[in-house]
Each structure stands twice: as C-alpha cells, then as structure tokens.
Amino acid sequence: MENNHKVKHIFVTGGVVSSLGKGIASASLGMLLQSRGLKVTIMKMDPYINVDPGTMSPFQHGEVYVTEDGAETDLDLGHYERFLNKSTSQLNNTTTGQIYFEVITRERRGDYLGKTVQVIPHITDEIKRHISAVALSEPDLDVVITEVGGTVGDIESLPFLEAIRQYRLDIGKDNVLNIHLTLVPYIASAGELKTKPTQHSVMRLREIGIQPDILLCRTERALPEDLKAKIALFCNVPIDSVISAADVSSIYEVPLYFNAQKLDDLVVERLNLKCGQPKLAKWNKVIEKLRNPQHEVTIAMCGKYVDLQDSYKSIIESFVHAGVSNDAKVKLKWISSEILEKQHPSEYLSDVAGLLIPGGFGDRGIEGKINAVSYARENKIPFFGICLGLQCAVIEFARNICKLENANSMEFNSETPYPVIDLMEQQKRVKSKGGTMRLGSSMCKITEGTLAHKIYGKTEIMERHRHRFEVNNDYRELLESRGMILSGINPELDLVEMIELPEHPWFVGGQFHPELQSRVLEVHPLFREFVAAALKFKQKNTNANS
C-alpha cells in the first residue's frame, strides 16, 4: 500500500456515548500542532451507509458542510477549517457508503479477478487507501489526524477500527498515535465522578486490538489526580496520558485547556515530531474578547430547523467570530418560520437589531420567512439573507414592491404566475438527489460602488454554493427598475449572486453560503459588517428612546 512514511498519523476514537466532542478535540489538537509550525490536516470517517450527508435531513445529521471542491460532508469539517484556518476537500470525509460503493464498483469491473470480496481485506484495504490518500494530498505534510465517527462497540464502526489497527502495523508503531475520547460521568446522587464507563470503553477497544496511547476524559469538572491514577492503572496508560476534557464556556477555549495539560507536548514527544513551542498569542486574544465583550446585540435567526441548532452550526460560529471582531456578544434569538405564518412578525422581531434568514429546502415555513423579510425591510432592520434567504427577499420584493401578486419560487409553487425564482437550467435534467446540486466554490463579480463592494473591498470573490434554484433572469430588469440592486453576478453562468436595497441601511442577500468560509482568526466580511450594522441600529434606537 502506497504511503508517505514521513507523515505521522493520529487516530481519534470515541466511547460510551456519541456527541462527546471528537471533532472539537481533533480540531483543537490540530490547531495546537499547527501553532508549533507543523503542517497538519484532519479527516473524518463516518460509519453510516449514506454516501454523504447531502440527502439526509438536518434533524438527522445537523448541517451539511460543503468544501471548496463541492463535496457535501460532515459538519465536523467545518470545525477543522475554522480551527486550522485552511480548506479541506472531498478527501477529508469518508463514509461507509463511499467505501462500499468503490469496492462494489471494482468488483463489478472485475478488478478482483474472481476472488471472494470480503470485509477483510477488501473493505479495510479501501479504508486504508483513503487514509493514505489524505497523507499524500499535500506536500510536506507532517501530521494527519483521523477522527473515527460513532463509538467503540458499534457494529458499523468495526471495519474502520480494524483498518486503523492494521494501519499501525503497516507503517510502524512509531508513526501512529491512538487517542480515545471517553466519558467520566458525574453522578449527583453519589457526589462522585465514575470511571467505570471509561474502563469498559477501553476494554472494548483493546478487545479489537487497539491500545489507546492517550485518553481524553470528557467530564463536567476537572479530574482529580487520584481518579487519573485509577484510570491510568485500569486502562494501561501512563498517568500523564490521562487528559481531562472538562466543560469550558466556549469551544475555542478547548485548545488552551489541552495545552495547559501539555497534550501537545505529549503528542510531539510520542511521535518524535521536530517543531517549536506553540504560538498562541492571537488565539489568547480571541478568548479574551470572547470572555469580556464591550457590547451586546440580539439578532433573530428565522429558520425551519431551529429545533436542532446544529443545522446552522457554521452560521452560529460565524456570529461568534463576528462578535469578537466587533468586540460584542451576539445573542441569537431563534424563531421558527412556521410561527410567523400565523402570528405577526412584530411579536417576535420588534426587540432585535438584525434578522438573518438562512438556507433550507421545501415549502414548510416559507411564508413565515417572507413575512419576516417584509417586516425587516419596512422597519429598516438590518437584514442578511443566505441562499434561500436571498430567494425569500426577492419573492417579498416582487410581491410588495413590483406588485407581482402571488410571485413565488418554482420550488414552492410550480403554478405561480410569476416564477421570480426558478430551477437552474443545468438542474432541469438532473434526476438523482445525491451530490447533484450546484456545489462548491465559484466566482462572483461585484459591482463597484455597491454595499457589497464596500464590504468585500474587491470586485471578484469566491464563495461556496449548495442550491438548485436561482433568481429568474427574466425578472432581473423589473427588479432593478423598482430599486433592487443586483450587486453580484456569476460571470460564467450569468446568475444573480448578491442583492441589496440602497434605501435600506443594511439589506443584503447572497445566493452562496459565506458561513462556510468564516474562521476564528479571519471572520467573513459579510458577518462582520452585518453585526456592525446591527450594533449601529441598536445604538440608534437606544439614543432615540433615551
């Protein structure tokens, strides 16, 4: 098997329960190693049979994160990009579905020369090929961190765990480190932290043939030394390899918490990595602003998946970044768009300083979103529409300003007399659902003198997309004649990418997803300026009422 032996591999597994934070732990460790001058990348291996999360409901899997090259991936890749401030690709996310699809394709082609195709070695070999492909994807790469989804003991995770067991044998134990994230629950009735779940999780891992080198123990409070010693004894690891992963107020504090316990020192020593000391000054500055913001502002998030906030994970984090940039705490007010179909928006939006309408699919709650846009436009509340949010803004403008009664999107009403939003021409021949939308990064040309141009400071930008419907070009002239500025256009497809209203203090829509490019140390300009506009709106109202 082809492999770059200079590259060191760290495998992160989880036990006891899911959602302990393997993605945050992996991203935090990656950030610490990167801060020491090492070149790091991270991949996620998900054990579900879906080829990707693109056809899954957000309620099932949270946000679908889209990479520059158009891969629909797990939301943890967003954490990887935000913490490491670098882009990932389709190589950085692998699912059981992808692995089996490739093996079955080879079998149908006759590549296995009549052999019986089995989980071992064929499936495990394919998993190892994916890991090696990431290791070879960048020149001078030092470390690949691989997060294995699910928990130890899950049937669907077994091929991945067997593959990483074999990988250590393939490239040598000095080139591999196994980190196991597990739970040490606090039992309130007993007043004690309990180590037994961790012991059993490690026991299951060792039965598979993997001895963890480092344990990250998720807990409500820091582990006392006696419990660390107990875990070390029963789990067969040195006591300094038992790291507390206690709750912190922000996910961005996790790297500093790990660094204080010398996790990165431990990894560097075990893998014999040649590097300097971590440079964390900029990160510490971010944390200081997070902890002590000078201002506070409330922004409404009006969507249809608000019952599972992970559906909007990248947007949430972009507001954190924008808050730091504006020295402010951004409080999000979650509003189900379905409620606004029955009740007047003023009951929910009169106390906010900004409104964001995020992306989504299907007609549920759409009229509520359109009502919210109308309220923000009429009351001069800063408005930001993302993807479907832009489309709702165009529909609202067409109905109420252009007087096109019952204007709509063809997605929601195929019989509308005024289809101001229509299926993209390239999408009309598409039958399959998975991976067939307009996906990934593409160029947008911005008109000079517009608000968009002021925000970006340039006339050409690259943004990521995930949609099938677009502004209908047949209505562009009418929209512009009534005052809407189409400030961003895709030059290749001649599609509207950005809109704005000049008579409004801050009314911007983007057909793309800017939240996918916001970083801890490099906030996206649209979010930065939207929060700045919301703070200005709040201050103006405060002065008017004082």
Image (tube, rainbow, N blue to C red):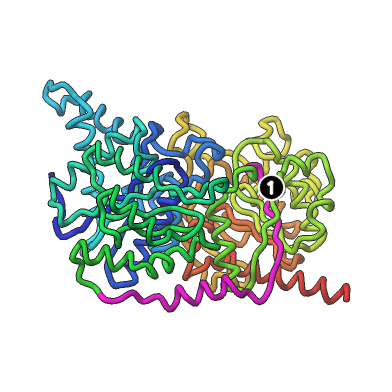
Q: Quick one: 64 or 380, which is closer to the camera?
A: 64
The residue under the point 51% across, 34% down is 428
Q: Quadrant of residue 197?
A: top left
Which segment is the magenta one? 276-305
The residue under the point 60% across, 67% down is 452
Residue 296 is covered by the magenta coloring? yes
On the question of residue 252 being in view, the answer is: yes
Q: Quadrant of the C terminus?
A: bottom right
The residue under the point 19% across, 30% down is 120
- Circle 1 packing at 10 Å, graded few (<14), some (14-19), many (20+), is many
Question: Tag 1: residue type?
Answer: Cys
Q: Residue furthest right?
A: 545
Residue 153 is covered by the magenta coloring? no
Describe the element under mark 1 as helix, strand or loop: helix
The residue under the point 62% across, 47% down is 388
Residue 541, horizontal then vertical, whole percent: 82, 71
Residue 508, horizontal then vertical, whole percent: 66, 60
Residue 363, horizontal then vertical, whole percent: 67, 36
Q: Quadrant of the N terminus?
A: top left
Q: Quadrant of residue 49?
A: top left
Q: Is residue 24 left or right of residue 304?
A: left
Q: Count the marks: how many?
A: 1
Q: Name above or below for residue 94 compared with residue 478.
A: above
Identify residue for label 1.
392
Q: Quick one: 466 or 307, which is closer to the camera?
A: 307
Residue 267, horizontal then vertical, whole percent: 26, 63
On the question of residue 93 being in view, the answer is: no
